[in-house]
Amino acid sequence: MDKRYFGTDGIRGRVGSAPITPEFMLKLGWAVGMAFKHHGACRVLIGKDTRISGYMFESALEAGLSAAGAHVQLLGPMPTPAIAYLTRTFMADAGIVISASHNPFYDNGIKFFSASGSKLPDSLELEIERLVEAPMSVVDSAALGKVTRVEDAPGRYIEFCKSSVPTSTSFKGQSLVLDCAHGATYKVAPSVFRELGAQVSVIGAEPDGLNINAGVGSTDTKALREAVLQRGAALGIAFDGDGDRVLMVDHEGLEVDGDELLYIMAVDLHQRGLLKGGVVGTLMTNLGLELALKELGIPFVRAKVGDRYVMAELRERNWLLGGESSGHLVCLSHTSTGDGIIAALQVLKALQRSGQSLSEARQGMRKCPQKLINVRYVPGAVSPMDDAGVQAAVAETEARMGDAGRVLLRLSGTEPLVRVMVEGQDAVLVEQEAARLAEVVAKTFAE
């Protein structure tokens, strides 16, 4: 069955437009409570990022869950992976994150974690959708769910992050700049790196409810690149609004993306004999990573775009390491989901072991020229992916690129966007073909 509300990463959209409304969130909270009640007494954790709408949706979800008889524990502003971790350690039935990740403040969304700290299976998402469409009822007053607040949630998560590196780890003397995107990592991330001895300066750590991801964070590293150069730091670390993505900036002010960070971690694990199996990337992963890993004899496979698909492939193969160019990096030897802070710690530790700077470590992977253009479209009866004209344009581009390149069109799972990607060894040709293909899509499905 097709899902009506759930996308690749939960439910997301513009605040005030269906389904991102208080009324829907009330019903969604009730549906989640009812779906999980087959376990018996139902307990759900709720965390959020720093968007102003988070207060409104937290209250609505809380009311719906209580009406279903589910008990709620509020975590406040916390990174998405922290909710996954705390759901496991509190032995809760589910975890809910109110966040639209890297999107602007006027968007919001809901993500869910199971008791194991993993994304919900499709079957459970479909069950929740079925209940959302059913009439809402309220349990007897004596059976209503209770709501409490977890006061020590940040401290618990900070200690968990620190436990992902050896207890002897010290980054003393290393100067870092953290960009917290005015988002969910603004309190915990600086504490983690400072407590491990690093000299930390911070930008993007003054959230006002409206500035999340605005000119800061992993979606816009300009401010971080400038700060690293101005402060003479060893490197910079950029998180996104909910803390499940990470990118870096080397001491020369150059951005280091998720593919390159994945390469650095893979090399470190491989050299220490701890890389179990291979590495999972996505259809968007740069060809350079695949070639670099092949030279080392490390298997590499591509999953569909989305961290849930990377996770599914890792679990299917019983591998430990995977991720996306955007900075969703999954280290299953340490946690159950993509975690920006933990991934950053693994990269720093890998650099420390090798004695290399971030700039030096990235040199082992030569990125192929790749151009990604997002084309906004108006959803209609015909998908851009099924349009005959668009398909013909893709075939023409593939013919011109030949065996030395890749062409990929895909729909965003969170926004009405067609992501047009062209990759190859000839940078000029890549730019030309990506622009041509994006123009075809734009003209055919103009907003």
Image (tube, rainbow, N blue to C red):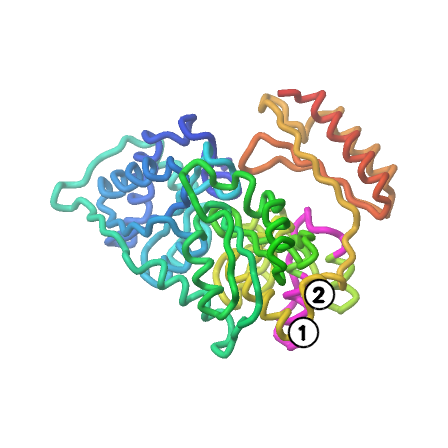
In the image, taking residue 197 as reference, residue 148 lies left or right, namely left
Decide whether residue 363 is among the magenta residues.
Answer: no
Residue farthest left in this picture: 142
Number of numbered markers: 2
**Camera-side residue of 29 and 343:** 343
**Camera-side residue of 7 and 14:** 14
Which numbered tag is attached to residue 247? none
In this view, 62 is above or below 278: above
Residue at the image position 74 percent from the left and 41 percent from the top: 371
Which numbered tag is attached to residue 361? 2
**Neighbours of disc 1 within 10 Å: few (<14), some (14-19), many (20+):** few
* Boundaries of the magenta span: 263-288
Callout 1 touching callout 2 (CB < 8 Å): yes
In the image, taking residue 34 as reference, residue 115 lies left or right, namely right
Q: Mark 1 is on which residue type?
A: Ser
How far across and how far down the image is residue 384, in percent?
66, 28
Helix, strand or loop for disc 2: helix
How far across and how far down the image is residue 237, in percent?
57, 56
Q: Mark 2 is on which residue type?
A: Ala
**Neighbours of disc 2 within 10 Å: few (<14), some (14-19), many (20+):** many
- Please say whether residue 319 is visible from this viewpoint: no
Which numbered tag is attached to residue 354? 1
